[in-house]
Amino acid sequence: MENLFTQAAGVPLNHYIYLSAIIFTIGVIGVLTRRNAIVIFMSVELMLNAVNLLLTAFSVHSNDPSGQVFVFFIMALAAAEVAVGLAIIVMVYRNTKSIDINVLNRLKW
Amino acid sequence: MTIEQLIWLVPLLPFLGFVINGLGRKSLSKGLVGIIGSGVILASFIISVVIFFSLQGDTQKAHEVFLFDWISAGALHIPLSFLVDPLSSIMLLIITGIGFLIHLYSTSYMHDDEGFGKFFSYLNLFVFFMLLLVLGSNYIVMFIGWEGVGLCSYLLIGFWYTNSAYASAAKKAFVMNRIGDLGFLLGVFLIFNFFGSVEFSKIFPQAANMLPGDNKLVLITILLFIGACGKSAQLPLFTWLPDAMAGPTPVSALIHAATMVTAGIYMIARSSVLFDLAPLTQHIIAIVGAATALVAAIIALTQTDIKKVLAYSTVSQLGYMFLGLGVGAYTGSFFHVLTHAFFKALLFLGAGSVIHAMHHEQDMRHMGGLRSKLKTTFATMMIGTIAIAGLPPFSGFFSKDEILAHAFQSSPILWGIGVLTAFLTSFYMFRMMFLTFSGKYRGTHHAESHIHESPAAMTLPLVILAVLAAIGGAINLPHVFGGNEWLAHWLTGAGVAQHELDLSHSTEWALMGTSVVAAVIALLYAYTKYVKGAHVPVADEAPRSALAKLSYNKFYLDEIYDFIITKPLNILSKFFYRIIDNKVIDGIVNGLGWSTNEASKGLRLLQSGNVGFYLFMMVFGIIALLIYTFSYIL
Amino acid sequence: MEQLLLLIFLPLAGAIITAFAGKSAKIVSTVFSVVSLGLALFIACNFIPNASTQFEANLPWIADLGINFHAGIDGISMLVVLLTNLLIPIIILSSYKHDYKNQAAFYALILFMQTGLLLVFTALDAFLFYIGWEAALIPIYFICAFWGGKDRVRINMKFFVYTIAGSLFMLMGIIYLYLQNPAHNFEISAFYALNLDAAQQGWIFWAFFIAFAIKMPVFPFHTWQPDTYTAAPTQGTMLLSGIMLKMGIYGVIRWLLPIVPAGVQDWSCVAIGLSIIGIVYASLIAFTQKDAKRLVAYSSIGHVGLISAGIFALNQQGMQGAMVQMLSHGINVVGLFFVLDIIISRVKTNKIEELGGIAKAAPQLAITFLIIVLGTVALPGTNGFIGEFLLLMGVYNVGIWAAAIAGLTIIFGAVYMLRMYQNVMLGKTNELTITFSDIQGSEKFVLYLICALIIVLGVYPKPLLHLTEASVQHLLEQVNQKLTSVK
């Protein structure tokens, strides 16, 4: 464990930024291109976690624990969101037998 | 008792009469209403007489009586105050004196009318406003009376309001008066702006120091004259007066002959200082007056309604008075106001007596031969007719000749028109008398048996007025007849401008001779045509010569006004309402709403329901915002 | 201070109690409105007629934003406060013959509106003014929407959107002034003291003017008005025409003139021009109206045009004329609408041509109606004359042509008013009007009261003129002082 920490601390900040940017971009592209609601949902989680990673990294970098506190907030929030979101998707599926978002276009004028 | 202590009673009493009769019009008996209505006017008359004589014995000729502050705003202060001077004191006598006689007459004339109480309360209210008009010490108090009498005129013309033609006549009178009133108001604004006050006592001394022909003065006087045109029925605003005959006959006598319509002359005589300094306005007044006198006289030639003849005659005589004002004969005009009040009130009341006897028949074609049945009425009306025709020695002769003499001095053309009018006047007046009183009776036999002379309450005023019409000329007897022109001297005390005649006595005699001869010729012509020839005017629809048609149809003035004013305004009104208001302005307003609606209809298509598209737009938006925010780095 | 707070919030308390009063709502609301009137009279008696602001209340409200509950009364406010508290009981009394559904709500809304109006008329804090401005709009919206006549939904929507749109311009102006204000508060005195250049004043003038012009309404912002007056229940129309349009006039006097005098000076010719066009235009339209209520609505546009022209003439006569005419117009127009309400509710038609001869059947109504008509056409001796005379005199100082055209109102007014009077009251009775019954009970009381006010104020207007004289003078001095300092 000790070793892991020191190793992690040795990773330069840039790398964290690159990594989370990549993960975030993957999330965005996933949201934009996929049609399956569950996959989109997972992509959103990916984006959230990219941000979490960045928050943690900066928190360690600047020796300020409040960043990590926010990460916990976000995780709690994400959990709640998943619960509600999945419930909606389940309901949608029960009603339409599909979770393809292109089929779900009835919510309009 | 001094004048200051008495004067407020003069208008207050008629006002009390109005209040009592107005509130008690249902509960008070007719007798009581008549006594109260006439009594208050009589009391006012007595007080006016007292005031008149105490003013005569007084060295101070003008008394201002302050009652209370009415309007004050900034530099403008308008007190409600009265001015008692020779001019207003004479007007007080005319209004209350003739007013009383007409009230007395009405107690009998209106006796069977269900609106008896209402009638007397209106009549009292009229006297109240008329007294305010002449007593006001500034233009605004005068204006209260000015519009107040207009209101009473409206109420009394439309007295029998269930007849919608009468109600329309009342409305017409009010509106035409209002046109003049706007001129009056603007004139007053100009006066305030120029002199810094609306009080007579502040304006006239300032004006006296000004040069004649000042532009502002010309404008002021023209505007005031427009006001006078409305009230005193001059061209082009006279058409309301003949229609005003819809009112009960005593009203025509009091309001539309003796008092209210002379308010314009009173106002100009009061402001003679201003008018004297505006020669341009004077020319206009003289021309308008002469034209009105002539036009109205021509119309009167062919009228068949006895009251209409008298109405046009009134317009014509008022034109005379304006002609007098225009040529600077302020005293002459005022003198004519006085004598005209006597003989025209007399003629109207006489006509009322005839109408009363004929059971509300006013068409002269159905009269005739009434002389033997209505002896008093005939005799008194004859005196009135001679007076108005300008035959000596009755009052009309003196006042008319004073105006004509001044007109001659100013311009022989104006004098010529005056003499021509005098000729026409004499003709149509005798025509009216002969058609009514001589020849054979032309109505139904049944009606003939009911014809009877009116009761004493109606004939007494006739007799009194006849006496006044006969001898009234004495108060301003000219030097030619060895008189001393008492009225002229008296009015000097009120600051009424005087212009001495610059004619030799022989010229004066010649002028008088001419007009008397003209009148006599007209009398003889009327006599041959209507008594000897027993001519009766043709029925309405019968063909007439072009000139007679023009005269009979009042020069089509009503139709012309209808065509050039009423119709276009109505069309404009509908155009404004239907097109401008509903289509253009409201169209723009609704168009704004509509276009918002349409825009949203287009925009809502973007909301296709495609979640992928929403997400794309969201990300696009975020990126766009980021670029915008950090664009300074790039 | 306590008196002022009581004055403002008593009607609100009344509204709340009335809302739960059920069947006795009429009585309860009457009591509250009469007590309010008494209170206003008490304040007026203790009011010293000078230029100072009296009975001032200044309480912190939202301190962080510099918003205070700051209200007070000077001569100008006093007059409109009196007008409001005088007309509300009259309006409530005038509804006695009606049995509105849900009457508790109806009367509660009227009293609620009174509080909004009083806030507008006493506020010395721009935020408070704006709150009052909108608070007065809400109840009238519901009154028109629930108790209105034909086509009320569409008409009401238009009215609401129109006025709100105007208000937003004003809000924009207020926020701008707030941001310019170094003290960062909404105090009117701080706004007065601002030094804005001509361009700023120009656009703030328009922001405020549009709001006020819509409320009054001034040509060409008037098209909501005839429809709304016609469709609203009579009491709603009375509230709108009698009191609410005075909000616009009051706004011009209190908030527009002293804050942006240079803007006013630059644009006053446009404002006066629009007002005068409005006078002639609306009067002409009134000529041929067939609907009596609509006729009075257009006549009201004409009269308000004269008031607005008189104010923008920026002189003592015009301004005081406007003050008097605000009160007179309120009384007269309420009287007119009440008479029309009496007639329309009996014969069930508002078409002028179908009526006639009512004077025969109802002489008392005929007399009172005539007096109100005469007041409206400004006959000397009635309250209308004092106002119109001073206003025309004020307009005259702008130019004689302006006065001559504006003065057409006295001719045109006589034409359409007498035409209406003749068609409705005179002539022969017909089958509609033959059974017409004369006024009685509350109708008699209200109409006699209105007629008495018309005549008393016309014969002895001095107390009114005296009440406002010092404040108006002070206001004009302020404006002139600021104008000279800008130059």
Image (spheres, coloured by chain):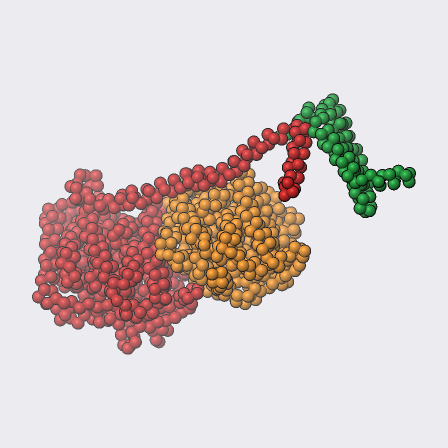
Chain colours: A green, B red, C orange
State left or right for residue B248 relative to residue C237. Answer: left
Q: Is residue B431 visible?
A: yes
Q: Nearer the viewer, residue B91 or A12?
A: A12
State left or right for residue B282 relative to residue C289. Answer: left
State left or right for residue A108 relative to residue B144. Answer: right
State left or right for residue C23 relative to residue B450. Answer: right
Residue at 26% of width from left, 44% of height from top? Answer: B560
Point out residue C94 in the picture as x, y percentages from the top left corner. Answer: 53, 50
Residue at 66% of width from left, 27% of height from top? Answer: B610
Point out residue C102 in the picture as x, y percentages from the top left corner. Answer: 61, 44
Residue at 49% of width from left, 37% of height from top? Answer: B591
- Establish if C349 lies above or below C401: above
Q: Residue furthest top?
A: A97
- Establish if C226 lies above or below B215: above
Q: Is residue B455 visible?
A: no
Q: Quadrant of the C terminus of chain B?
A: top right
